[in-house]
Amino acid sequence: MVISHKDLASVRAKYPDKKIVFCSGSFDLVHPGHVLILEACKKLGDILVVAVGRDKDIAENKGPTRPIMGEDLRLKMVDSLKPVDYALLNPPHPEGGWNSQTAPLEIMFGLFRPDVWAVYRDAEQMEEREALSKKIGTPIVAVEVSRTVSTTQLIKKIRNLPE
């Protein structure tokens, strides 16, 4: 179900006795690697909440040609995946902005406290993430899957195909 970040407190209220797992990502060109990662995240608890990065943030992090798909389509794709219980767009950075990828996470974690924060094993800015994990009291768990695919690898492969 697609929700707003403002609805996160109601998710926690609805499932007070369930283990809520949170993860986030770009999810550009959703592929089997994303499905495997989300399945691994879901195994960590009962309810999986997934935040999808905003177009502006992804362009800043991955370059001006990204994302390939707009945030509304990426959100729709993530929401349609079986392991996902709730999907939402990251909240916008506060006015004046924080120069940090963890800024939207601080906003969301202020609204609800997931029981587990799942990140992919090669997540960027792990030091910042671990500091935020300690600050909010939610353990970070690095998930790993046996077979992965990256969107960047897929884009490179597609660009090199003969026409």
Image (cartoon, rainbow, N blue to C red):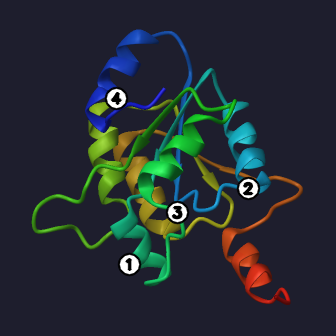
* Secondary structure type for disc 2: loop
Marks 1 and 2: which is nearer the front?
2
Q: Sequence order check: which comes first, mark 4 or mark 3?
A: 4
Residue 136 numbered mark, or none: none
Instruction: In this rendered view, identify the residue nearer to me: 147 or 124.
Output: 147
N-term-proximal mark, 1 vs 4: 4
Rendered residue at 23%/60% (across/down) = 93
Q: Mark 4 is on which residue type?
A: Leu
Q: Position of residue 87 (x, y in %)?
A: 48, 36
Which is more N-terminal, label 1 or label 3? 1
| Quarter of the image with the C terminus in it | bottom right
Residue at image coords 83%, 86%: 161
Which of pointers 3 and 2 indicates the residue nearer the eye? Answer: 3
Q: Position of residue 100 (x, y in %)?
A: 32, 69
Q: Tell me: 40 left or right of 17.
A: right
Residue 124 rendering spot, x and y as whole percentages: 54, 70
Residue on which the image places disc 4: 8
* Marks 3 and 2, how far apart at CA: 13 Å
Q: Which residue is mark 2?
A: 31
Q: Measure the alpha-carbon separation of dots 1 and 4.
A: 26 Å
For marks 2 and 4 on the same chain, the one whose residue lies earlier in the sequence: 4
